[in-house]
Image (spheres, rainbow, N blue to C red):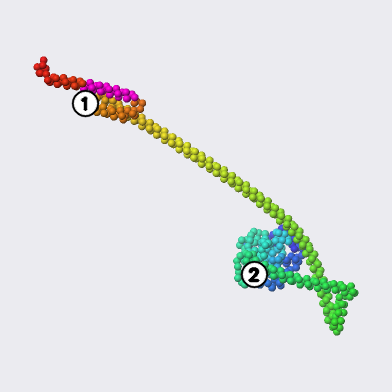
Amino acid sequence: SFLPSAPGPVALGPSPCRRPSAMPKEKDKDKGDGSGKAEPSDAVSAKEREWPELIVSSCADATISKIVKGTFRVSTLNHGKPVYKKQEKAKGLDVLIYFWDDRDGLELCGWWFGPVVGGDQVWAFHPSRSSLTPPGNEWNIPNDGAIDPTFSITMKAVGGSSSKGKAEEGGDDDAVRKQLELMKKEQQEFEARMKEIQGRAQERKLREEELRKRGLEPEESDKKTGVKRARGAEDDSAAAGARAEEERRRLEAEARKRKEEDERRHAEDEARQRREEEKRKLDEDVARRREERLRQEEEDKRKREERRKNDAEEERKRRELEQVRRREEEERRRKDEAKRMEERQRKLNEEAKRRKEEVAVLGMIEVLTRMACAVPEDFPSLEVMFDRAMETLLPYTGRQRSVLKTEAERVLKRTRGYVKQAELCRQDWEDWYDLRQQMPAALLEE
């Protein structure tokens, strides 16, 4: 198997891109399911028609698109999952879709497009480890490039009808699992037949060793047995001995190969155990780092939330203070306006009162003047006017009320005395005049 290393450069020419690789132990032992022998292709061919075909679309890279685009069918198994092969070759190369497990590291585990299973040249990569069939999208094209959103794989159902969607959709998983179980069962049957053949070869080897201990070569034993059974056919016995020798050599070669295979498997098991231990430690470290990152993210989120709440609380308090300040300012302006209106009204009232006082004072002076100039003929009307002025004008004369009241009483008393005296004088004159009219003219002439 390959040892993991850094990804190689991407070739966009006719040849495929290089897969992350290292020096292989044995070139031909990379293929298959990692056990050192290829899985029986005749077992897969028997069920090949029952597997759905895959329709691979084009991608953004024009060179790789010409290579991978086409129809793929199941050809064999690798690491417990099917290997799909394109019906046509691309520039003389086979185009395969296969799965590689984590025996060479997590960075190499996933689905690959390449010309050879486990080869160091690939065109595309998908890191899925749980999918039973090639995923439908999110492939890295080239293998060390970004995800190509235009690339997709569609599963074509058995019988010619096609269905869109990912190759690992839940509806097709049951059928895929059944196919895998059948293929694994046939592989186990094949391995059981191989073990039976190996057991027979072991028995034959033990029998040959027993014959050597007795001092007889296997060929001689076979020849003696052939002579006892058919004494007239020496040529047939010689041919049977040659076939037996050939079978012995073949079984010895198979035993040597099986021993080498066991040693290789043992080394691979130890390497796998080391990789699993490294993977476990790596997973633990990744989990620890993930937990630390999650805790840090939670702490940052909590701090951001607290900061946001504090900012919101400060903003709320600032708005409340602003509203209180505005209300106080509005109340102050309203009070100032009311005070100004009150002052203005007071001034207007004082001005009106002052004007009314002036009018009342002038009216009282006019009435008193006319009353002071009264004669007996107009005194009654002036007296009525004087009484009305005392009722309507005097109360509004303000600070001059007492002075005007005293002056009004004086004027009224004087006017009444004058009018009474005038009336007495008139009465005396009228009496004199009447008396004169009654006197004789001689008296008058005298």
Which residue is depicted at the point 73% across and 67% down? 32
In the displayed structure, 253 sits above or below 424; it is below
Q: Amino acid at mark 2?
A: Pro
Query: Image quarter for residue 432?
Result: top left
In the displayed structure, 397 sits above or below 52; it is above
- Residue 31 location in percent, x, y? 73, 66
The N terminus sits in image quarter: bottom right
Q: Amino acid at mark 1?
A: Glu
Name the residue that disc number 1 marks: 377
Which circle, 1 or 2, is nearer the viewer?
1
Which residue is depicted at the point 36% across and 26% down? 399
Name the residue that disc number 2 marks: 52
Query: What secondary structure is marked by label 2?
Result: loop
The C terminus sits in image quarter: top left
Which residue is depicted at the point 60% across and 68% down? 163
In this rendered view, identify the residue nearer to me: 197 or 440: 440
In this rendered view, identify the residue nearer to me: 64 or 266: 266
Task: Identify the residue at the far top of this view.
Answer: 446
What secondary structure prevails in the magenta region? helix
Q: Which residues are magenta?
A: 402-423
- Residue 412 location in percent, x, y? 28, 24
Q: Are marks 1 and 2 in contact (CB under 8 Å)?
A: no
- Residue 51 location in percent, x, y? 66, 70
- Residue 70 location in percent, x, y? 63, 68
Q: Is residue 211 magenta?
A: no
Categorize mark 2 by other alpha carbons within 10 Å: few (<14), some (14-19), many (20+): many
Query: Image quarter for residue 282?
Result: bottom right
